Amino acid sequence: MKIIDNQSILLDIYQEYRLPPGLFYGNTGLGIVLLLSRQLSCDDFFGKSILDMKSISTDITLESGITGVGIALNYLFQKLQKKQLRGLLSEIDSKVCQKVACDSNVDIDSSYGAVFYLCHRLRNDKHLSGTIREIFEFHIAASTEHIIDYYIGTTHHDYRFSLRHSTSVFVFALSMVLSCTGNKTMWIKKIKPMLPVLLEVYPFSPGNRLMYWHALSQLNKLLEGNKKISNHIAILQHSISQQSLLDCVNGNVYLGEGACGIYYLSRHFPEFKDSMSNFSHEIENYISNSLEIHHLGDIKYLKNHLGMWDGVAGIMLIESLMRTDRIFHGNFE
């Protein structure tokens, strides 16, 4: 799909425009797609990203802070350089642990950032000492308790499709903790009493139902199968169609809340296995013919829509993913 006429303009904007460095909304997301499309060298990408992180050093949210950037940079560095970003990660470790330990009013997004980041560290760094692992698990436990208390004490009605659907993110966090920490038995005992509440959730939007299907399926595997969860997963699975997913985005094309996000979630949904090739072309046409693509041709508009969540970076990432899927799967022509 053709996003903008001259994609090299994105490199100029990345190098000169003062966009915040966050993963979802900022420069890091844009840098990732420029790196993957070989418009940006590894040295330039990692150098700029690490330097930019100074301005978000106290933000530990995934969306705009050091945890999201840290996970992304470490993942890419492992893939490209076959090693960990040890010095940078140690700095992030310290800031995350300090934030959750010392701030009595830590916000819920920061708690989620801490859980996902510290679980990422436990899962991906086999050389962490026993002491460091204990420290990480302590802070994961405290942040998870905060997340659980917050979820139980609030009610969320998510009628619009979004990859930040609150219950899905909550269940993904529980799955991360269950899979990455040492005391699995303790967490199973904490999670099981919450299952009746989680099994009452039936998101209004088909897109959020698809995301919740993914989240519950992952949790169910870690719990080694639960009949009630399996039944609810089946109800969610049979309620979703490709057309209903396209309808639910209501003109939005972006990764966070639009057609790109729907494609990302649909790739491993069993009901679509035999029709995913056609669906990918439908989504590509949907994006290519949208008013948003037309608007992105205007430089002023483009500068406000550069990020991974609600901008060009997310569209380019999904475009690349579609190409890869079609290469590696025979039915993706």
Image: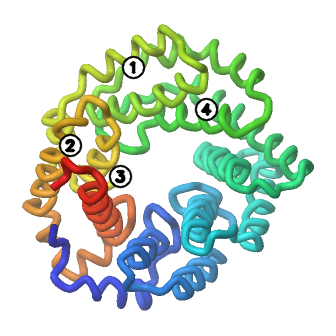
Q: Which residue is mark 1?
A: 233
Question: Residue 286 occupies which quadrant of the picture?
Answer: bottom left
Q: Nearer the viewer, residue 112 or 260?
A: 260
In the rendered structure, which disc, 4 or 2, sits on the residue that comes first in sequence? 4
CA separation in Å, label 1 and label 2: 20 Å
Task: Kindly indicate the quadrant of the structure image that contains residue 314.
Answer: bottom left
Mark 1: secondary structure: helix
Mark 1 or mark 2, earlier in chain: 1
* Percent x, y of residue 50: 63, 78
Q: CA distance from mark 3 to mark 1?
A: 23 Å
Horizontally, is 17 left or right of 191 in the view?
left
Q: Amino acid at mark 2?
A: Met
Residue 35 on image: x %, y %: 43, 78
The x, y position of residue 296, in whole percent, is 19, 73
Q: Is residue 238 above or below residue 27?
A: above
Q: Indicate the secondary structure of the residue bearing disc 3.
A: loop
Quadrant location of the C terminus in the rendered image: bottom left
**Circle 3: residue type:** Gly
Q: CA distance from mark 3 to mark 4?
A: 21 Å
Q: Amino acid at mark 1?
A: Ile
Pick whichever of labels 2 and 3 is earlier in the sequence: 3
Depth order, front residue of 31/80: 80
Residue that carries the numbered disc 2 in the rendered image: 276
Q: Nearer the viewer, mark 4 or mark 2?
A: 2
Q: What residue is drawn where x is 72% and y is 25%? A: 187
Q: Mark 3 highlights which residue?
A: 256
